[in-house]
Structures are given as C-alpha cells and as structure tokens.
Image (cartoon, rainbow, N blue to C red):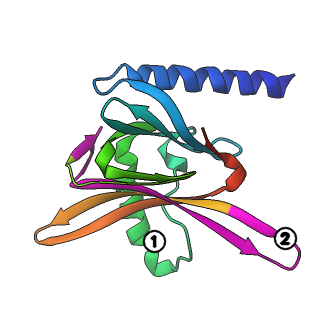
Amino acid sequence: MKLLNGLSLFLIAMVCTLSAASAQAGPQSTATLMSCMTNPPTTSYQMLAVEDGFELHVFHHNGTKYMPIHSGTITPNDFELLKKRADYLQQMGSSAKIFFKTSECKNEGPVWKCFSKRSLKLRDLQAEGVSFHMVPRQTSTNNYTFHSMDTFLSFRQKEGHIQYDITSSYSFDKRDCIER
C-alpha cells in the first residue's frame, strides 16, 4: 500500500508540475508523442505535439543535483570540466520546456532528432541553440541482449569565434521509453 501511495503522490506531483509548466507563455500542448522516464524516477523526457511544432519537457524528479551530466569513462583530469558542465546545466532548473519548430525535428518510430539554431533561455541557462536526439543501442553478452535508448540534450555555446556544445546524456532501458 505504501508503494501505491508513493506512486500516486508522484503521479499527482508530475501532473501538477506539467500543468503549472504549461501555464507559462508558449505553445499549448496537444498530445504526448514520446516519453522516457528512469525507473525509479530521476529524469524524464516527454515530447509533445504543440501548435507549429513540438515541445520537449525535461523533468529532474529529485532536483538538479541528481541530473545526468555525463555518460562514459571519466578520469580525475575530467573533474573540473564535469563541475563546470554541472554548474551550467543546473541553471535550467528541475523542469524545462523546449520548443522546436516542425521543420527542426525528424521522428522515426521511437527516435527523435531535433535541432534549433535559435537562442533560448531556460531560467538562468542561456544558449545559442539546442538539440535533442535519441539513439537506439543494443549490447549483447553471452546469453542476453540489453536494449537501450541513448538520449542527448545539447546546448550550443559560443566564446568569441569558437562554438561548442554542453551535453547532458543518459541511457534509458528501452522499456522506460514509450512511443505513443
């Protein structure tokens, strides 16, 4: 019963958060097309169809201190860079909505690839562009094949004439991503 109550509270909180977020200025959401949520919930992505495009909802259930900022091997030399990346990405807050025009996205089944060159501001995070893309992956061992969906949320930065991306990446179990 405690698990059911905890899950019910989580779902109510998620609906309230998304409802409050949709009350902000911007396109009105019409249909959920894809959602990925870690199990247990820590980070979620949800793609919605909206007027003139798509809206990516990003939600860090436990706050930005637990948001994914890197996937892969790190060395002690990487710690300073990872700290800078974390500080930058935390500026978007625990939830964010990112709009992409229809022409900026491609959808092939459960896989989304969106890129916008427009400047954007999400709370204190500022970027010269943003992209979100998904890559299906499978890893095989002797008797088992693990299917996952790698996600990449990148924010374009510019220092002088040099451009670079700061990326938050996460690998979801394929069962944690739902195409609607």
- The N terminus - image quarter: top right
Tell me, yes or no, whether the highlighted magenta stretch contains residue 18: no
- Magenta residues span 120-147
> Given the image, on which type of amino acid does mark 1 rest?
Phe
**Residue topped by disc 1:** 79
Task: Pick whichever, 56 or 10, lies toward us.
Answer: 56
Q: Is residue 167 above or below residue 53?
A: below
Q: Secondary structure at mark 2?
A: loop
Q: How many marks?
A: 2
Q: Position of residue 52 (x, y in %)?
A: 30, 34
Tell me, yes or no, whether the highlighted magenta stretch contains residue 138: yes
> Given the image, on which type of amino acid does mark 2 rest?
Tyr
Q: Is residue 108 above or below residue 64?
A: below
Residue 116: give its label.
none
Task: Pick whichever, 169 or 93, lies toward us.
Answer: 169
Q: Is residue 97 above or below residue 119?
A: above
Task: Decide if residue 175 is on the left or right side of residue 102.
Answer: right
